[in-house]
Image (cartoon, coloured by chain):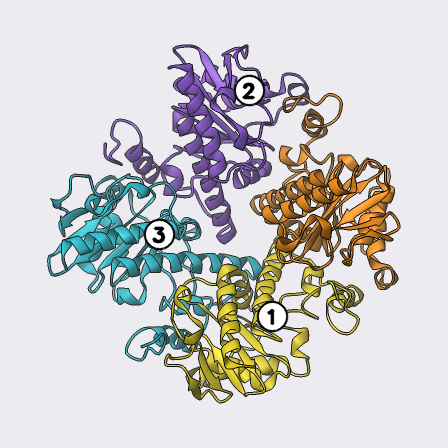
Chain colours: A orange, B purple, C cyan, D yellow
Amino acid sequence: MLIESLRKEVLEANLEIVRRGLVMYTFGNASGYSPEDGLVAIKPSGVPFDKLRPGDMVVTDLDGKIVEGTLRPSSDLDTHLEIYRNFEGVLGVVHTHSTYAVAWAQARREIPCFGTTHADYFHGSVPVTEALDDGEIEEAYERNIGRAIVRRLEGIDPLTRPGILVASHGPFAWGTSAGKAAMNAVLLEEIARMAALTLGINAEAKAIGGALHDQHFLRKHGPGARYGQG
Amino acid sequence: MLIESLRKEVLEANLEIVRRGLVMYTFGNASGYSPEDGLVAIKPSGVPFDKLRPGDMVVTDLDGKIVEGTLRPSSDLDTHLEIYRNFEGVLGVVHTHSTYAVAWAQARREIPCFGTTHADYFHGSVPVTEALDDGEIEEAYERNIGRAIVRRLEGIDPLTRPGILVASHGPFAWGTSAGKAAMNAVLLEEIARMAALTLGINAEAKAIGGALHDQHFLRKHGPGARYGQG
Amino acid sequence: MLIESLRKEVLEANLEIVRRGLVMYTFGNASGYSPEDGLVAIKPSGVPFDKLRPGDMVVTDLDGKIVEGTLRPSSDLDTHLEIYRNFEGVLGVVHTHSTYAVAWAQARREIPCFGTTHADYFHGSVPVTEALDDGEIEEAYERNIGRAIVRRLEGIDPLTRPGILVASHGPFAWGTSAGKAAMNAVLLEEIARMAALTLGINAEAKAIGGALHDQHFLRKHGPGARYGQG
Amino acid sequence: MLIESLRKEVLEANLEIVRRGLVMYTFGNASGYSPEDGLVAIKPSGVPFDKLRPGDMVVTDLDGKIVEGTLRPSSDLDTHLEIYRNFEGVLGVVHTHSTYAVAWAQARREIPCFGTTHADYFHGSVPVTEALDDGEIEEAYERNIGRAIVRRLEGIDPLTRPGILVASHGPFAWGTSAGKAAMNAVLLEEIARMAALTLGINAEAKAIGGALHDQHFLRKHGPGARYGQG
């Protein structure tokens, strides 16, 4: 992919999470990965969204070495990179502090699959990472967040769980492009909101059964998908 | 009714549920039924709302055979058809994943009639369907949702309960036109929100009595209605 | 007051409750009273707010006899009239189905004065009416709602409690003009929202003491008021 | 600082808290302090925000003596002054009745640091003042609120806790300028909202540990900060 296109797509994903109300001030970032080039484009750190231009996106290699760009990359870059290095097929990552997803992350509770809106996009609960220990926090913190994410999804196809809650922090979402990652971040916030309200109505609410879960996930994903214009 | 008018009305109902905030992305659909022709017009599957034109509405007969249109119909078509085949006088159906109605559906709780906003539009609680069994989920899923809806309302005039919660899924609403169905979907969401907040304030809140319920429902509906400009 | 001015002010109050998000569809109404003429202007029943013009306001005397206007008045007219006939100094009344105030009305709980936002406008809790009995519901329903309001405030200066929750229904607010009544309806909704959230954080939250309550109410109201530009 | 600039900055901070949805009607005020001149500029009392001009800001000395301006200052002036007199480095103060922060203040609960959004801006919980006694309420009320704030933060660098909840009332926030104070008021509201939702999901949620708290606070504040473009 041309770096120019990647930058534009990444900028657009950053703007999308603002438009959808997931971001206040500069609390969020989107990146995209081009596997042919081995390059990642990411939002610069602490720059207001309304001032961002494609050329402000910082381009690095998978080790975080800056290849193009004069600004400092998002402080969460190392988390994004750890995800790209480990999750086959993931070409976009988004991090936000969206309100309801943060609330679940702070509650340190997985989001059970209470219904079909969830099942349409997540094949299973929305997982929560383990807490980091003090050593992991004090040294290489952002990379260790990435490692905790990767560890939690061990043995799971990350495209069937396109997001996670980092304990006491907030959501990361991903997908097959920066735009899809942004969409998954939006969906995760709505799923988190619906689930919180569900518990408020019925504290004993139960996750749905496997047949219903599969029916929904598989009608939107994989070879048998039959949703949309095909 | 001219098919052309039906399509326009159905498009308008689809746009209304977006404007009222019931829909994110493509998660919702409205249809309308013309009994003289035996034809149904419905939103196409997975097409963004802001791109819809009247000619995109898919027209089918009551068995789901496409009569006009080049796009695939909403994947929920079979649920809409089951409703039209069984509910006398229902000429419009709307399905959404609106947040509070979904929360009640996920909680698998009927919405008790806690007050007059509810009583003005639903003569009784807002019902929830029984869960489908695995066989019903795996084969003819959408039609079986329709059957569960019809079963739950057996012996009830569907125009006195113009909506239902499909268990672990979300709301369907209906009415004497696509536009009325959209309005009932909006009202159902607000009723669901008020009821969730009521429980948060008083977990022991009780449904209102029959005299108050009748007074409100009947002042807006039926031969004795005295609301509006008459 | 010229009837022409009263109509304009009443129209403006009706539009204000829409702009402030208290009203969906036609669920709300504002009226104003001119004691010199003994006349009341009120919103017509079931007319969409965006079509209202000053000349659509229906003018009646205090017994509800229509003096000017070709439309039917709001079905809640008799409640408004009962308030004007009994509450000295009240020249505006507003009824809405605003979400949080309805939730408290449906919960059938008074809103305790949990803090100074409340104390700035209500000198005491926000009261709830007693439920009507079946006879009161079946005959002269709207007038009986007004009577229940008046009964609940017996011995209380209505301008120190400029609103009430009608049990299982929703709020009525009032003031020294239609505009002030609209403002009190907005404040009541916000007070109801804050109080519901307060209970969610601390189910044992207590009403504030008398000294703090007086300090706030009296700095905004009455002869010693020292808020604003005086 | 030129008084002219201070006034503009204070006006802008007042408008910012409106734009961010923290304020209804005239329920909020921002001020700024210029230590070189010993002067404070503050919003006038009870003037609608949309009519404010820089010249309307009231300029006083640290004892509250009006130096410039023809309007009455905000009734909360004495609280602002008490903060400036006692909190070294604080050059801006904002008071609002934002909904979630008020709910915590009314619940009279400190906001525990449940996650990193909070830790990024508050080094510790968001404190609540002690209730004032009747004497403190009846005499020099606003100044006594300021004293309760100062007392509660005794021994704490106020720039590491840039806000507080006044018991049964609402939030005050501050910072190194009026604009920063406004931003801290916005963040406090969001932190309060996230924390309330966290408790709704898990009533046993616990504050985060010291290592995570420090990592976040110190990456945005102090000599080792590495967030933004540095």
Q: Nearer the viewer, residue A93 or B132?
A: A93
Q: Considering only vertical position in the picture, is B80 above or below A55? A: above
**Residue picked out by circle 3:** C17
The residue where tag 1 is placed is: D180
Q: Amino acid at mark 2?
A: Leu
Q: Chain of mark 1?
A: D
Percent position (x, y) of residue A191?
A: 64, 41
Image spot of residue A159 (x, y percent):
77, 35
User: Foreground: C172 or A22?
Assistant: A22
Place residue D44 in its image quadrant: bottom left
Q: Quadrant of the N terminus of chain B?
A: top left
Q: Position of residue A102 (x, y in %)?
A: 67, 53
Callout 2 crowding tier (Cα within 10 Å): few <14, some 14–19, many ≥20: many
List the residue tagged with mark 2.
B77
Residue at image location 58% in from the left, 18% down from the top: B71
Q: Residue at x 75, y 42 (%)?
A: A4
Left or right side of D99 for D176:
right
Residues under labels 3 and 2: Cα distance?
39 Å
The CA span between labels 3 and 1 is 33 Å
Q: Are marks 3 and 2 on the same chain?
A: no
Callout 3 environment at 10 Å: few (<14), some (14 to 19), or many (20+)? Answer: many
Q: Nearer the viewer, mark 3 or mark 1?
A: 1
Measured as percent of width and height from the top left, residue A74 is found at 76, 56
Label 1 CA crowd tier, 10 Å (few <14, some 14–19, many 20+): many
Tag 3, which secondary structure?
helix
